[in-house]
Structure formats: structure tokens, C-alpha cells
Image (spheres, coloured by chain):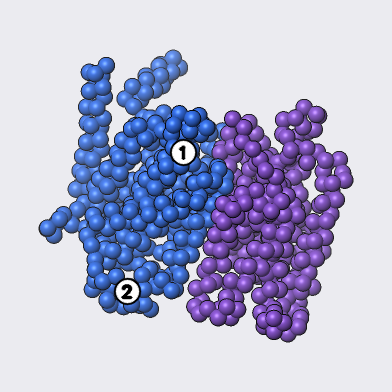
Amino acid sequence: MDREKRNHFIRLFVAIAAVYGIVLVLEMTLRPTNMLFTVLKKGAIYSLVAVSVNLLNGFTGLFSLGQAGFMLVGAYTYAILTMPVAVKASDRVYRYYDCIVGFDTGVFVGLIAAGLAAALFAFLIGLPVLRLKSDYLAIATLGFAEIIRAVFQWDVLGPLTNGANLLREFKDLSRITFPFTDIPVPQTFFVFTVCGICILLIVLLINSSYGRAFKAIRDDEVAAEAMGINLFVHKELSFVISSFFAGVSGALLAMFQYTVQAQQFRSMLTYEILLIVVIGGIGSISGSCIASFLYIALSEWWLRGLDMGTFLGIHAENIFRSGFRRLVFSVIIMVIVLFFSRGLMGDKELSWARTSAWLRRTFRKREAV
Amino acid sequence: MVDFFHQNLSYFLSGISVGGQYALIAIGYTMVYGILRLINFAHGDVFMCAGLIMVYLSASLPFAISIPLVIAITAVLGFVIERVAYRPLRSAPRMSVMISAIGVSYLLQNAALYFTGGLAKVYPEIGFLSRSVDIWGATTRMVTIVTPFVTVALVLILTFLIRHTKIGMAMRAVSRDFETSQLMGIKINRVISITFVIGSLLAAVASLLYFTNYASVTPTSGSMPGLKAFVAAVFGGIGSIPGAVIGAFIIGICENIIKGGASIFGIPGSGWTTFSDAFTFAFLIIVLIVKPTGLFGEKSVDKV
């Protein structure tokens, strides 16, 4: 048993190291404008949000639809904190307001602060909201996300948030360097590192005694309470932690996009992430990650032709026009929701044993044919 | 006091009118929730689709044909959505049905985005409704005055339907106890289909009134009214039709008073308009915490 466990960890470590190695090598060799990097970066960011949603929806059984709001808080916090003082003082970004934040911080502090700010919002929102049950909770969190969006666009807060205008020229992915040097950090590698660490923390949390308490709450609230689990404390904990990582991913999304605007963080974003979690399987971390990369690869890259007029060699400008990709996509999602409601992975995790068993089964079938 | 009313009459008028439109949407939510315990996230988008269908139909057909046609098509849309997306999941956990509803909402919005090309479509001027009138010094459109009457009339008809007809009795039975009513020989699927058809019918009427006022339809223009109508339904006590109507009127009026906040309360800043949406949700949360069953809702007890 012990040996098996050690082997398992060695395999896991090798696999993760291999992924990072490949990312680094790709980044050194391919041109940085390659579509692959967009997919990898955005996919990693979406994986992080999807996993944070999964922590709430899949492992604690709290159906929350507020993720876009917490991402917005994270994105704004990061952008405001890391924007250089010189930019804040000039009217390049804050054209109509005088920025009241008189300092700037580094990337690392910015990311942590983004998470903490989102967590603080979540803590305050959670106090009233987490007493509600399933669908009421969903609609209340959705409502709070909308309120957050409204507050950040409010012109009275303009000196802080720049009103409804764009924020840019903060430390985005193209401006990060290794500490104390001017050497730029490979972008995709950076995103992978941050997301990897965050997801690892969530996995550790889920496997801890807190994680077991979360699952107990998911399976039966009354029974969990009878076993001495403080429902409210654990729900609040799960909500705050999930929002922390949503905030970090919001900051990463801001870095990736180079700009932030409250307008982007509509409830559509929450729906998209929720649907990714469903595609991957509610309650499966690896499922969420795989689904995020698949979703981004499909929507940003492989199905691009559906919007551009030519797909799989078929040329039909009248049908394949702007928006068709998303239409096809939503039909695919409906099919998954209706007929494969367990998603890609169900509530299982990707593992060596399961993959090899799956491969063996497929190959045996081939041979039989 | 009279002066105050007089000065801000236009806000109150549009509040009452928007409230009536929300009420018609809210009935769809509250009936579906009463029977299936499902927040039909797609309902707001059905409302938006009714608006778009009207835009396309009225381009080639006279109003006498296109208006009934829009209402009929929307009813069919509601029926089809229930049939395809919710019925297969009848025995699945509630969360899957809700996810399916979100999926339908996503699908309808994307479909609308594709067909409109992402542009706001101009809503046709329906002669009589779009005419402007003067009431006590406030200029407004005819639709503002017509809406409350249409709403009340439809609600009365619906209440009659539910109280005094066989299908109405079946609906009440199903919403009281799903399984027992099935054992009593009520065809549940038929009742649910009819509920969705009625909800969509009312949403179509609401879209006629609402978009005449706002003059343009975009793929996302259904989501906000939808959410607000849902809040109204919760406020009134979910499952209760009079509750939903009263809740909708209150929300519509409050929202417009906040929009006019600058002149009513003398608070500076255009930012108050931003908060007319936020208000609804703050209101929802207060209602849920103070009185989770709403105005006329029945208390439900969780059994272990």
C-alpha cells in the first residue's frame, strides 16, 4: 500500500513536471503569436475558475452563480494596485477622474490582494446569503454579482475604479519580469504556475478534514449537522475560499486581456463557467480542467471556421457567419446536459490506473473488430 | 404632496407600466416554480424571443396577423422547451434541471445573437399603443396607460381559470403534491405543458407592451426583466399569482423612483440609474432574509 502510494506520487510528479517542461519548451520554440498559447493561457485561467466553482457546487453542494462578480473584484483590485503611479497620475487611463490610489505594487502582491479582496466581498455577502437554500441561493448570488458590477461602474467611485471606462497599462502578461531583473517571464509558463499552485491548494483542501466536511454537507445537510459539523462556518469557509481563487483567476484574466472593464463580467460569464464544470463532471477536479481546455480550444481555435465562412473545407458564408460558433456550441452543451449529464469524468478523477484501463478496453475492442 | 406627485408623475406612470409588464412575466415564473420547483432561467429569454419574432414578422405582415401569430409562436416555443429540455430530466436531481434551464437560456441568447448579427433590432411602432398622450402634464405613450389594465384583465382571467376549471384544479393539485396527484389520475405532463404554454403566452403579451416602450430588442434584453420578474415572484410568495402581480408593481415603481432619484430626493449624480437594477437584488435579499415565504407564500417544512 505504502509503496503503491509512493509510486502514485512519483507518477503524478513526473506527469506534472512533463506538462510544465512541454509548456516551457513550446514557449521557447514556437512563435508567441501561435493560437496554441492563447488556448493554453485562457484554458489554464478558466480551469482555475472552473475548479473554484466546482469546490462550491460540486464538493459543498452550494449552487452559487456569483463567480463573475468575484472575478470582477479580483480583476479590478489587481489592475488598480499594479498600475504604475506614473500612469495613474497621467490622463492616459484616468481621463475623467483623479486616481486616489497613490502607490503601486508588484505582480505577486497584486494577485494575492485580488484574491483577498474577492474573499472579503464573499465573506460579507456570505453572511446573509448562505442561510438560503438551493435555488434561492443561486438567484441571490447572481443578484449580488450584478450589484457588484453596478457598484464598480458607479461614477461616484470613479477616482478608484475609473467609472465605466477601461483600465489598462497595468502589469499585464507582457510586462512581468523575474524579480530584481529585466528578464521577461515566459507568459504561458507564468499562467500555468499560478493556476497550478492554486489548483493544488484546492485539491489539498478537498482532501483535508475540511474537504470531508464539505462533502458531508453536500450529501446530507441534516446528517452533517447531526455529526457535529457547523454548517454555517463550513459553508462560509467554502464560499470565501472559492471566491479567493475566483478573484485570483479574475486578476489573471485581466493580465491575459491587457484591459479590464466591468461590462465583461456579466452573468453570461458565470453561466459559461458553470457549463464548463458540467461538461467536465460536477465533483471532478481533473474533469473541470480538461473541460476548460477543451472548451477554450474549441471556441477560440478549432471551431473558428464556423464564424469565418469556411469550416472543414465547406464554404458557406450565409450560414457560417459571426455567432454561428456559439450557436453550435450551445447546442452541444444542451446535448451534454440532457444525455450525458455526468459529464466527461463524472465525479471520478483522472488517474494512471483508470487511463490505462480505458486504453486497454478501447484497444481490445479494436482488436475484436 | 400633490405637487410632489405632479412633478414626478412620469416616473410613477412608467413605474406602474413597467410593473404591469414584469407582472405578466412573473406569473410565468411563479406558476412553473409552484409546480416544478424550478427557476425557469430561460423564461426571460423566451420573452426576448417573442420580441424578436415580432420584429421579423411585422416586417412583412400586418399587425392584425402578426400579433396573434407572435403569441402563438411563443406559446409553442415554451411548450417545446419544456418538452425537450425539462421533461427528460423529470426524475433527475433539481440541480440538473436548473443547469438545463441555464443551458436553454444560453442557447436562446446565442441563437438570437446569431440571427440578429448582434445588432439591436428596432421594434415596430404598433399604431395605437405607440401614440403619445398627455396626462396631467406628463407626456407618455398610450402603452403606459394600457398596460395596467391589460395586466389586471389577464390576471383575472387566469385566476378564474385556476379557481373554476378542471385544468386549474389539476394545476393546484399538482403544485400541492406532485406524486399524490399523479396517483389520483392527473396527467402531470399535460398539466406542466399547459403551465408552460400559459406562461409563454403571458410573456409574449408582456413583450408586446415592454418593447413598444423601449423600442429596441437585443439578445440580452430579456435577462434583466426576467430576473426582476423572478424577484417579484419571490417577493409575492412563490406560487402565488396575486403575490407575483403585487410584487411586480412594487418593484416596477420603486425602480423608476430610483431612476428619478436625482430629482425626487435631490441626490446628485447620474449614478443612481446604475442602482435601479441593483436595488431589485438588494430587495430580494432583504425579502429572503426577513420573510423567506414572501407576502402570500405558504410555509414549507423540510422533512428529513
Q: Secondary structure at mark 1?
A: helix
- Which residue does the numbered mark 1 point to in the structure image? A231
As drawn, the label of residue B56 is none
Dot 1 amino acid type: Leu
Front one among A55 and B236 = B236
Place of residue A120 in the rendered image (x, y in percent of width and height, measured from the top left): 37, 54
Residue projecting furthest to the top: A368
Is residue B259 toward the left or the right of residue A40 in the image?
right
Q: Please identify the quarter of the rendering in which residue A8 is found.
A: top left
Q: Against A285, is B139 above or below? A: below
Would residue A228 be seen by someone viewing this image from the given angle?
yes
Left or right: where B141 falls relative to A200: right
Residue drawn at point x = 80 percent, y = 38 percent: B170
Q: Quadrant of residue A351?
A: top left
Question: Chain letter of disc 2?
Answer: A
Q: Which chain is tinted blue?
A: A
Residue B66, given in percent of the width and then of the height, sits at 77, 61
Q: What is the distance, in whole Å, between disc 2 and disc 1 at their CAs?
A: 42 Å
The 10 Å Cα crowd at callout 1, few under 14, some 14 to 19, many 20 or more, is many
Q: Residue at x 26, y 22 (%)?
A: A5
**Disc 2 marks which residue?**
A99
- The answer to whether residue A312 is above or below residue A213 is below
Label 1 chain ID:
A
The amino acid type, in three-letter code, at marker 2 is Cys
The image quadrant where one finds the C terminus of chain A is top left
Which marked residue is nearer to the observer: mark 2 or mark 1?
1
Residue A290 or residue B43, whichever sits in front: B43
Q: Colour of chain B?
A: purple
Name the residue at 76% across, 81% down: B135
